Image (spheres, grey):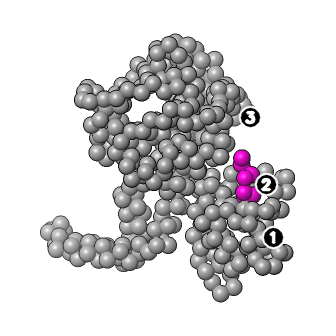
Amino acid sequence: MVRLSDLVGDTEEFLTERLGKKALFRGGAVAEPGEIASVGDIDRVITGSVLRTPGIRVVKGGNVVPPDRYTSPSTYGYAGLGDVIDPAKVVQHYRGGATLVLGTVNLLLPRLNELCKNVEMDLGHPVDANVYVAPPDAQAFDVHCDAQDIIVIQVHGDKNWTLFDDIVADPGGGKVVPDGKGASSSYELRTGDVLYVPRGMPHLVRTATSASIHVTISVNTLTWADLLKDVVAGVLRSDEYAAPLPMGAGLAERIEPLVKRYADRLAADVTAAATADSVHRTIYRRPAYGEGHQAGLLRSALIGGDAPSDRIVLRPGTWPLITTGADTCLIEAGGRRYRVPAAVARACSLLGYGPMSVADLSADPEEAAEIAATLIGLGLAEQAGSRS
C-alpha cells in the first residue's frame, strides 16, 4: 500500500518545508511503479474500456486536438453514442507526435485510486490523478503553472522537467507563462522517480529519445472561498433573507444604508453557523471525497467479506462525522447517513486513530464481531490489509 510518505519521504517535513514552497525530487522513490499504473493498465483504459470524451485529451505542440478527430459513432449498448474514443485514431495521433492525457483516470484504475485516497487521508484535501502518455521528442504544453500541487510519478520511460523558481501566487485555474524566464532547475525523471511541483510553479515538460508515461497526483486544494461560499449559501436559505427589497422610485439610494445592516447580520449568522460539525459536512460531503466511500462494497458482499478478521480499518477516503445519542447515534460519511447503536459509533470514532483489533471493540466477543461486521457492511470499514 503506497502512501504519501512513500512518495515524499518525511511527511511532516514535506508539509512544513516543501508544500506550496519548494520542489522536491526523489529518485527511485517507487520501487514498483507498475503496481500503481502499468503500461498494460493504460492500454486497457484507452483501447479496451469504451472510453468517452472528455476522459481523454489529445495534445500536440501546445494545442488540444478537437475530439471529433479521434472519436467515432458507436453502437455499444445500442445507445448510438457519438463521443466514444476510437482507439485506432488515438494511437495514430500518438504516432504522429501527440501526447495522450487521461483525466481522473484513478476512477478506472483501483490501485491508483487507492493511492489517491491514501494521499487524501494524509492531506485532508480532495485528490485525483491524470496520466500522460507521450511519444519521443514531444512537448504537449507550453510553459505553464497549475492551480494544484502535483506529485509526479514516472511509471515508464524518461521525461525532462524544467521548473522555474518564480511561483505565481494563487494561480486559480492555472496560467500560461509565456517567457519561462528566470532561475530554473531541470530534472530527468526515470522510471520510479517522483517529483513534487508546488501549485503556481511554472514548468515545461518534454520527452527526448524515450516514450514516457507519468502519473500526476493532483491535490485539488480547497480554498476559503469554497468553504465560505457553502456556509454563506446555507445561511442565505433561511427565511430571514427571503424578504423582498422595498419597492418604489430611487430604490438603490433607499437600500444603500440597509446593506451594511444585512452584511453585519450575515457575518454574525455565518460565524454562528460555522460550527465544527457544519464545517466538516461542508468539506467532506463533496463528491471528490464521497466517490471512494463505497468502492469495493459489492465485492465484499459477494465473497462474504462482512465476516471480520482480526483487525479492521477505516476505508480510505472515509471521513465519518458522528453525532452521539443515548441509545443510537448518527454516522455521516460520503453523503450518506447511518443510524447505528452507540457501540458501533464509538468503534467508528476510535478507528479514526488507526486500525484496531476486533477483540478490542467490545469485551463481549460476539458483540465485537457484530460491531465489526456492521461497520464493514455499511462500507465504513474494511479488513486491515485487504488491499495489499
Q: Distance between the residues labelled 1 and 2?
A: 16 Å
What kind of element bears circle 2?
Answer: helix
Where does label 1 land, which residue? 369
Instruction: Identify the disc placed on residue 77.
Output: 3
Q: Which of marks 2 and 3 is nearer the N terminus?
A: 3
Relative horizontal placement of residue 225, taking residue 259 as reference (left or right): right
Q: Can residue 228 be seen in the rendering of this structure?
A: yes
Name which residue type carries label 1: Ala
For badge 2, the amino acid type reads: Ser
Tell me what residue is drawn at x 74 percent, y 52 percent.
386
* Residue 195 higher or lower than 371, as above or below: above
Q: What residue type is labelled 3?
A: Gly
Q: Are the residues tagged 2 and 3 within 8 Å (C-beta)?
A: no
Residue 137 drawn at (x, y percent): 46, 14
Q: What stretch is highlighted in magenta?
A: 380-388
Question: Gap in Å between the C-alphas at discs 2 and 3?
Answer: 28 Å
Query: Which residue in the protein does label 2 denote?
Result: 300
Vertical placement of residue 217 versus 369, above or below: above
Q: Is residue 248 above or below residue 12?
A: below
